[in-house]
Amino acid sequence: MRWRLDAGTTETLLRAAVAAPSIHNTQPWRFHIHDGVIDVRTDPARRLRVVDRDHRAMLLSVGAAVFNLRLAMALDGWLPVLRPFPADGLTVARIEPGRSGAPGPGLRALGTALFRRHTNRGPYARAVVPARVIDELRAAAAAEGAELTVLDRVRREALLTLTAAADAAQRRDPAYRRELATWTAGGPGRRDGIPAELTGPRDVHGWLPARDFGLLSADPGRPAAVFEPHPQLVVLSSRADGRTARVRAGQAMQRVLLSATVRGLAAQPMTQALEIPRLRRAIADPADPWAPQMILRIGYGMPVPASPRRDLSEVVVAAGAPTTAV
Ligand SMILES: Cc1cc2nc3c(=O)[nH]c(=O)nc-3n(C[C@H](O)[C@H](O)[C@H](O)COP(=O)(O)O)c2cc1C
């Protein structure tokens, strides 16, 4: 039996791909379907010039979409195969259906989380994540070539201090504020960025140095909440730090996030310290070759709504479109 990429299958695969998380919900991806393969590309026009100078967050975001696409293909009964792709500065993965086969229970479970995973910016319960769940998250990262480190008390406090320093520096930076304003402006019919209802409650005690997407909109109706005083943080690292390594790290991040969702965990990236090179170097252990790519706060939270996505017609590359980066 041969794989057929009819309209229904295309829609199923792309809907899964675009459900991926992306920095500031920029959705910096494009998909080119041709000759029985799907090319996943970055959309450089959607890269954040201030917080993502080195393109890392964009590559992680697109990597997450690659993972979802692979997963959706497997759920459709085809083993996804990653193929060599053109070095055109845009394409980050070429995915082809390999042999047919039913997905195992692990992948089927991840599939149930595809559209239930949402970034959760609310307070989490003061409950410890059990060791067996942490082990599953570690295994999810390892399955994609990454390492997940659970921080002990000392390292957690150190990372929270660095994150608070990064957050304060970003808040003071007019360019950061302009960029944040662009992606939190909302507006009727807008299908990207972070709408006001997803900024999460205000942190009454200021315990958690999370990025405040409500920073520029003094909303008097925004609820306030007490956040957990000792957030549980995990750091995802990759062995290398080039373009390919970052796309792989994005796939690992997404596998971890979906595995967390399967276990009923909430998660929120907290990446400010990774966006300032000096602080990112401080997080990396000089004696350790692994490069930090993602910081996640995990725990048990109340359900949150989904964030918007653009129409698929906006992310599909039309036949004959230019293939080189501008
Ligand atoms: C590389 C990267 C960095 C992110 N950094 C943050 C962050 O610092 N704070 C935050 O609340 N969310 C962060 N996010 C989550 C995005 O804002 C979120 O994925 C996006 O708004 C889409 O929402 P969803 O995850 O609910 O689908 C990050 C996501 C990615 C992929």
Image: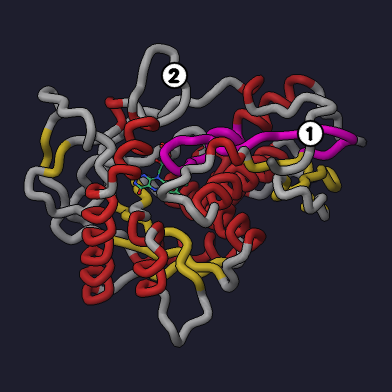
Looking at the picture, tell me which residue is in the foreground, 60 or 233: 60
The residue positioned 50% from the left and 26% from the top of the image is 309
Q: Identify residue for label 1.
A: 322
Q: Is residue 74 visible?
A: no
User: Could you classify mark 1 by the number of other residues whose Cα lies within 10 Å: few (under 14), some (14-19), or many (20 or more)?
Assistant: few
Amino acid type, mark 2 = Arg
Front residue (pair 262, 275)? 275
Q: From mark 1 to mark 2, how far is it between C-alphas?
A: 27 Å
Give the quadrant of ligand 1.
Answer: top left
Task: Identify the residue position indicated by label 2 in the image.
Answer: 190
Residue 139 at x, y percent in the picture: 52, 65
Q: Position of residue 247 (x, y in %)?
A: 61, 55
Which residue is pictured at 32% across the width and 54% down the height? 298
Within the magenta stretch, is there residue 315? no
Q: Give the foreground label among 1 and 2.
A: 1
Residue 170 visible in this rendered orientation of the protein? yes
Residue 188 coordinates in the image, percent (x, y): 39, 12
Examine the rendered structure and indicate whether residue 138 appears above or below residue 297: below
Across and down, in percent, residue 9 comes to 74, 26
The residue range painted magenta reads: 16-38
Query: In this picture, is 47 found above or below 6?
Result: below
Against 129, is 118 above or below?
above
Q: Quadrant of the N terminus?
A: top right
Residue shown at the point (56%, 38%) measured from the top left: 28
